[in-house]
Image (cartoon, rainbow, N blue to C red):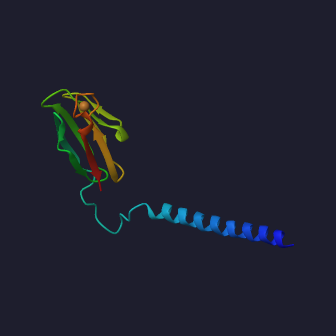
Amino acid sequence: MKPKFRLIFTIALLSIVLVLSACGKSNNGTAAPPANNTAPSTGGGQTKEITVTAKNFAFDPPNIDLKAGDTVKLTFKNADGVHGFEIPDLNVNLQDGQTATFTVDKAGTYDFNCSIQCGSGHDNMTGTITVS
Ligand SMILES: [Cu+2]
């Protein structure tokens, strides 16, 4: 009798935990989209031309701020040494003198890095695009 009660109690407890965690998930899901109807857009949707320059061993600028919805025309140039420019999350990979056009739809941070093994400072060649 007692072990059976314990089993039922355990199942009931697990059910409550599952229901609670399912609720938490759906709440997070519905809270994600921003309420665009209450505030005017703060500049998203513009086209911005940005040039990133690489030298031994850094990018200039190392940080780029964008608004969700912006389209970027990004040109990459080597000023010193031979480097590449890669944003893995956005499928952007540029060599010296190349330009990529892409749109950042979602807020978040997108890291970029050097895509060519350029020397001792290669691992320091990182930067971040922040989309708000
Ligand atoms: Cu490198």
Q: The C terminus is located in which quarter?
A: bottom left
Horizontal side of residue 3 vs 98, given as left or right: right
Q: How many marks?
A: 0
Q: Quadrant of the N terminus?
A: bottom right
Residue at horizontal 23%, vertical 46%? 47
Identify which residue is drawn at 51% across, 66% down: 27
Please give the name of the residue rendered at 82% of the width and 69% of the height, measured from the top-left corner: 3
Work out whether residue 115 or residue 123 is closer to the camera in this orientation and state it.
Answer: 123
State the residue at coordinates (28%, 38%). 113
Q: Residue furthest right?
A: 1
Image position of 27 with respect to 113: above or below: below
Q: Quadrant of ligand 1?
A: top left
- Residue 78 x, y percent position in the rendering: 16, 30
Residue lying at the far left of the rendered structure: 79
Q: Is residue 26 above or below residue 53?
A: below
Check the image and report above or below for 122 versus 31.
Answer: above
Q: Is residue 66 above or below residue 10?
A: above
Q: Measured from the top left, where is residue 6 in percent x and y? A: 78, 70
Locate residue 81 relative to residue 127 in the image: left or right: left
Of 45 and 130, which appears nearest the observer?
A: 130
User: In the picture, residue 120 is in which quadrant?
Assistant: top left
| Percent of width and height locating residue 55 | 15, 34
**Residue sitting nearer the eye, 23 or 81:** 81
Q: Quadrant of residue 90?
A: top left
**What is the x, y in percent for residue 102?**
30, 40
